[in-house]
Amino acid sequence: MKKALIGIAVVLVLLVGAALVIPQFIDLNDYRSEISEQAHAATGRTLTIGGDIHLSLLPSLELAVSDVAFANAPGAEPAEMATLTELQLKLKLFPLLSGAIEIDKFVLVDPVINLQVDAEGHANWVFDTGASAPAEDSGEAGDAPALGNLKLDDIRIENGRVAYVDDVAGTTYSMTEINMALHLPDLASPFSADGSLIYEGQAIAVAASIDTPAKLLAGERTNVALEIDSAPVSFTFDGGVVNGPQPKVDGNLEIAIPSIRELAAWAGSPIEVPGSGLGPFRAAGALAVDGKRYAISDGKILLDDISSTGSLLIDLNGTVPAITAELATGPLVLDPYLPKPASTAPQETVQSSDPAEPADWSDEVVDVSPLGLANAELTFSAEAIRYQEFDIGKSVLEVHLKDSDLVVYLREMALYEGNGTARIQLDARDGTPKTFKSVRVDSVQFEPLLSAAADFDRLSGTGHLEIEVSGEGRSEREIVSSLNGQGRIQVLDGTINGINLAAMVRNVATAVTAQV
């Protein structure tokens, strides 16, 4: 036993001595060309190390490499896909003997990554090595150090930059001043990530945490928090996550946007719709994800001065997505979103040389395929709707879409002491669109309605209106040519204000008598 212990001690002394002596006699800078050749064999690209390579083995494995450049795809710009001012790695050596990975330091200084999709759709991050794809991982134990013993101390990205160019879509995005720090004492302890970056001139702060990473890796539920904060938009999520073939999420999320218009302009898609609306927006609710089923409940939405509640369910388990949504608002003022059109001089009407000639309807086949992309059950309600001079009471609108059959149903609309309903159907189940439209208004008061619609207050009374129209065809011309329907307007107790009917009768009688 004594001799065995002496033997082990001698081996350890020799290993320690080698770890101390070898770096003194071996200069890794002499192996730059070989490192570059190995990188080229693996990726088909050139790896250049312009600075020094420093290595030490005890008490920790420390590696420092400076001035690194990785070539871009042939013909791509710039010439380098990635550059790095310095890489610093400090890894505890002895824990590796027991299968543990303890990283004291991993720092990337000034990393620059250029991602590009060229005009032919080729991505520069796809490497053409000419070699066959590697065999799949056998998953046998012992292939790699156990991830369960992973420890991350000082993991940082300093002053990074990422650029993305898509020549097919004609878009360019870039993130600069990327600074990120990760901390993980061990997988049983909380993981945290904090950082910031600049995107399109706006600073964005990012913070994330995982209560117990070991549970997340094992497919057990653990709490995850994510916060993204910037001037144009802020987002937070806090809840449980289960990672696996059927991922599950449950928690609360919130998004806040000071101005939708400013956010859209910052994102490169400015909103051209006139009006003063689409300013502050805030939404919060409970998120639940179960595999391919996504739900938001107890939703509270505030847009400008409009307060709403609602829910949303998206189920992707079927052949097409199934969407169910409900949205209920308080008083809805539409003027900021649908401003009154500016008055213009009447345009001269161009008459056709042939009065019987129909309008120039298109013969192009109407594309109804989008109706088959999803099934939906949507309900929208408002306590009141106000637009310009119109004052509408409680209204409920339903949208039903199933197997390419769309029905839009105005189930309720309180309208000037009366009630209105409407139904529009577009049935494309057999590929030939069939349209049905019906409108019914009961007991509406004409005077306030016509005053709001046309500034006309000379007619009063109670009115009823019914209209039904149907048509079918594969093009606009076919649909218009097939239109058929009926309508009925009834006025009860109607009067024409400002006209003395009795005086008109007397004048007519006098005129007739004078001629006798």
Image (spheres, helix red, strand yellow):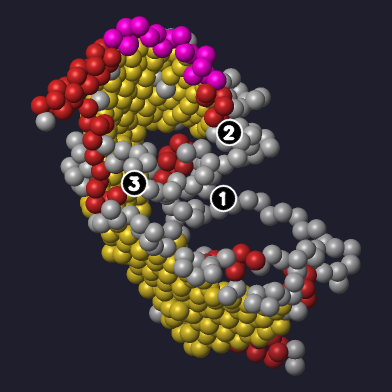
Mark 3 vs mark 2, CA separation in Å: 29 Å
- The residue at the point 69 percent across, 91 percent down is 513
Circle 2 sits on which residue? Answer: 127
Magenta part mainly helix, strand or loop? helix
Query: Quarter holding the N terminus?
Result: top left
Residue 386: percent from left, percent from top: 41, 63
Q: Earlier in the sequence, mark 3 or mark 1?
A: 3
Q: Is residue 117 magenta?
A: no
Residue flagged by tag 1: what amino acid is it?
Ala
Numbered tag placed on residue 342 in the rendering: 1
Q: Is residue 305 above or below residue 9?
A: below
Residue 115: percent from left, percent from top: 53, 31
- Report whether 223 appears left or right of 514: left
- The residue at the point 36 percent across, 53 percent down is 303
Q: Earlier in the sequence, mark 3 or mark 2?
A: 2
In the image, the segment drawn in magenta is 21-37
Mark 3 vs mark 1, CA separation in Å: 74 Å
Residue flagged by tag 3: what amino acid is it?
Ala
Q: Earlier in the sequence, mark 2 or mark 1?
A: 2
Res 192 visible: no
Residue 59: percent from left, percent from top: 21, 18
Q: Nearer the viewer, residue 198 or 210?
A: 210
